[in-house]
Each structure stands twice: as structure tokens, then as C-alpha cells.
Image (cartoon, rainbow, N blue to C red):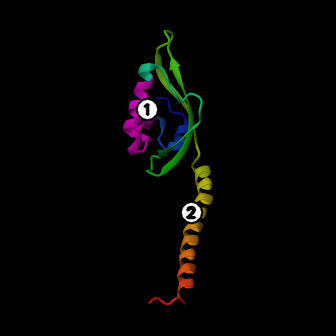
Amino acid sequence: MLWNASAQRIFGYSQDEALGKTLSIITPEPFRERHSKGYFHRIETGKTKYGNPLLRVPAIHQDGRSISIAFSVTMIFDDQNQPRAIAAVIRDETERFQEERKPKEKLADLEKLLKLNMKAIIFSDMAHLKFF
């Protein structure tokens, strides 16, 4: 694994702390097994379906907080065209992700409030009815 200053800024681990470790140090626990299997399958086959699209996934900072990252990947091959590694260009999108969530959360809150108000209106309209 290669680890540069940007990786340290995003994930909190120094190069010395990250080298020799697997990506499980930055992968949320629920995704670790799937990520590991996928990684080794890609190295074995030399093929990835993730070459072009920008992927957005959760990650874990060294201090334990959840962050959002976006990245693209490419396979690295040796002189005999055998897969040797996978390179990723990663950026921290935590702020952007949180900003995008705000309107969605606000809309969900407003929908809940509207449903509660509609029930109150219905019950209020029914208050004058007499049931025999």
C-alpha cells in the first residue's frame, strides 16, 4: 500500500502507521469482508467493474468518526500483464455529503409534520360528529 500526505490528511494515519496494514483500517466493519473478497478477486482476475465510475462510500477516520469519500480505481499490471495492485485516487467528500443530506432531512421532517397535521385536521373535523 502506498500512503501519501493526502491520505494522512483524509484518514488520520501517518505513512508509518498505515504501511503494512490492510485497507480494513479505513473500511467500516460491515463492509470489510466484502471489500477484502472483492479486492483479492480483482487481483486474481485482473478485471474490475469500477474502472470508470466515481465511487462514493463511507470510510473510517483514525479517530473513529465516519467520513465520506469518493474515489476512482485502476488496475496496475506488471511487464507480463499480470495484475500487481490496484491504485485509487481518493478525495474526502464528507462536507459535500453532509450538505446534500440537509435538504433531504428537512424534506423528511416536513413530510412527517404534514402527516401529523393532516391527522389533526381529520380528527378536528370529526370532533363535531355524533356517533350512535
Can residue 20 be seen from the camera position used here?
no
- Quadrant position of residue 34: top left
Q: Which residue is mark 2?
A: 108
Asked whether disc 1 touches disc 2, contact meaning CB atoms under 8 Å apart, the reply is no
Amino acid, disc 2? Ala
Q: Secondary structure at mark 1?
A: loop
Q: How many angstroms separate mark 1 from mark 2 (CA)?
A: 43 Å
Can residue 28 be seen from the camera position used here?
yes
Would residue 44 be counted in the magenta stretch? no
Residue at the front extreme? 132
Magenta span: predominant SS is helix
At a point 47% along the width and 14% down the height, the residue shown is: 82
The mark that comes first in sequence, 1 or 2, is 1
User: In the depicted view, which residue is nearer to us: 39 or 118?
Assistant: 118
Disc on res. 69: none
Q: Residues within 10 Å of mark 1 (few under 14, many from 20)?
A: few
At a point 52% along the width and 40% down the height, the residue shown is: 8
Q: Is residue 53 left or right of residue 77?
A: right
Q: How many marks?
A: 2
Q: Position of residue 2 (x, y in %)?
A: 49, 29
Disc on res. 19: 1
User: In the depicted view, which residue is nearer to us: 21 or 29?
Assistant: 29
Choose mark 1 or mark 2, whichever is in front.
2
Residue at the left extreme? 33
Q: Position of residue 103 (x, y in %)?
A: 63, 59
Q: Position of residue 111 (x, y in %)?
A: 58, 66
Numbered range of the magenta stretch:
16-42
Would residue 31 be counted in the magenta stretch? yes
